Image: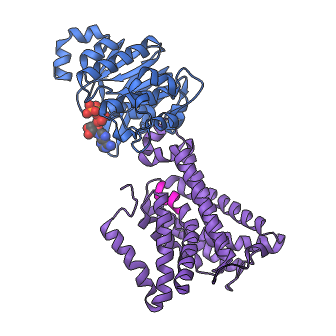
Chain colours: A blue, B purple
Amino acid sequence: MLEVEDIHTYYGESYVLQGISLRIDPGQVIGIVGRNGMGKTTLIRSIVGFTPPRRGHVRFKERDVTGWASNRVVALGLGLVPQGRRVFRSLSVRENLLVALRPGGRWTADGVMEIFPRLRERAESRAGNLSGGEQQMLAIARALVTNPDLLLMDEPTEGLAPLLVREVGHVIERLKADGLSILLVEQNLPLALRLADHLHVLSRGRIVHSGPPDSLAHDSEVRSRYLGL
Amino acid sequence: MEFWVTQLFNGVSYGALLFLLAGGLSLIFGMMRIVNMTHGSHYLLGAYLALTFLTRTGSYVLALLGGALAIAVLGVIEWDRFLQGLRGQELAQVLTTMGLALIFQDLALVTWGGDPYNLKIPAVLSGKYHLGTFFFPVYRVFIIVVALGVAVVLWLVVERTRVGAMMRATVDDAEMARGVGINVSGISLGVFALGAALAAVAGVVAGGFLGIYPGADFEILSYAFVVVIVGGLGSLRGALIGSLLVGLLDNFGKALFPELSYFTLFAPMAAILAVRPTGLFGRA
Ligand SMILES: Nc1ncnc2c1ncn2[C@@H]1O[C@H](COP(=O)(O)OP(=O)(O)OP(=O)(O)O)[C@@H](O)[C@H]1O
Ligand SMILES: [Mg+2]
């Protein structure tokens, strides 16, 4: 599904991703954990093409998409739930879904409103007027209506109340049960351990530990060194 | 009384022309944030081309459409060759389009010479409507109708269609617009071409009553930017109100205080911007 091959990504002179490789097979949920500023979002940005890597390759569905315009990568089947939600604030909820809609797949605007009933109630509201939780639902729904084969989620539970964290967790579980491949960046370690099939720990732009959830759950040394737990 | 009604009507019809001119710039600069100094060139070249088409074909409609279409194609070329790579670099956009505008000015001078022309308007649009003791030139009524039509169509496209929603999404967050699959480059190209064509339409329409002459491109360029900035970047309603305001101020200024007309036009504009830096309807 996705192969990231030794990518090196910079912001100007600042060298952030220092050689990251990973792969995601169909139906897998891969978790990325790590402390603030370690390069998790930069990894997502490199894959979707917002900040293309200077060296290395991103291969998605057997195509080398390194350096492609992001909209082409998305059209190929990559969905993005960005950090900070980034809904289109001046558009209504319905319009947020409309502009992202890529018909011909499992998800329609009506379909996502089934799993997020709040969005149906607020369909005509400006997205900028939604609560943080509602905006997060919208950001997920907006990515789903692009009918992705792989979903990139960057801290989908950040800043949410515990009840909403659980709801987002359930949604991700459901998507996983549907067979969707997911790259999940998450600071909430219990959630990441529960949802991911495999985890990578990121520190200063490198992967410093990889393994199934068990390995991390039991490795208190890695947890304290790289996650501050 | 008659003076006021006539001047009011003239001001409104001039404002309508300004809206034709500024509506396109409102999309190009106000929404997509491309600083386009060739907007005046599109106006003037559109008028000159229509003049040539009119002499060749004798049809006003063909001349109008031909001028608009040719300028749309020119807009596509400009965007594709020069502006595509300058996304977000305002200074580079200013310098590039300014350079192009100067080249277009010279090309126009070489092709059509330095004499002023008037675009002959069709018989159906000449004459006057009589209303009691007042006379309203048909042509100026025509301009108001065209401008209203364009305003309604633009508004519907931007506010009520999927492409319009994609434009607004791009304005909100261009990177994220790409991130949900919106072809931002394609949209920006389309907007640029449409805006260019609208400027050409304005030039053709103006050719029938302001005339076509060297220098008109830069003369109206400042008006177009004033309207868009005073109306508020990204707001079509702002461009419409701004056009009417500038049209009325310019008209009454010239009629009442001819020697102060620039002052009566630009002082209120400066005052508006001092109070509301984002313009009348700016999204900030
Ligand atoms: N646009 C940018 N320009 C310059 N440096 C940046 C930019 N964005 C991020 N950085 C830097 O790159 C490094 C990695 O940032 P990144 O956002 O990828 O971290 P993160 O792991 O996602 O952190 P968080 O958990 O806070 O979201 C940080 O040192 C950050 O300061
Ligand atoms: Mg981050």
Camera-nearest residue between B109 and B126: B126
Q: Residue at x 78, y 76 (%)?
A: B123
* Camera-nearest residue between A125 and B37: A125
Q: Residue furthest front?
A: B132
Q: Nearer the viewer, residue B109 or A11?
A: B109
Residue A218 appears at what percent x and percent y? 21, 8
Check residue B26 for magenta coloring. Answer: yes
Q: Is residue A184 left or right of residue B59?
A: left
The chief SS type of the magenta part is helix
Q: Residue at x 36, y 74 (%)?
A: B270
Q: How many marks?
A: 0
Residue drawn at the location 73% of the way across and 62% of the way down: B65
In the rendered structure, the answer to whether residue A165 lies left or right of residue B22 reads: left
State whether residue A197 is above or below residue B45. Answer: above
Residue A48 visible somewhere in the drawing: yes
The range drawn in magenta is: B25-31
Q: Quadrant of the C terminus of chain B?
A: bottom left
Q: Is residue A171 above or below residue B245?
A: above
Q: Residue furthest right?
A: B57
Residue B56 as seen in the image, left or right of residue A217? right
Q: Position of residue A37 (x, y in %)?
A: 25, 34
Relative to B186, is A112 above or below?
above
Which picture quadrant has residue B263?
A: bottom left
Q: Position of residue B14 (x, y in %)?
A: 56, 75
- Classify A42 as above or below B36: above
Quarter of the image where one finds residue B214: bottom right
Q: Quadrant of ligand 1?
A: top left
Identify which residue is drawn at 64% across, 70% down: B143
* Residue B79 visible in this rendered orientation of the protein: no
Task: Indicate the position of residue B71 as horizontal and vertical percent values.
Answer: 66, 63
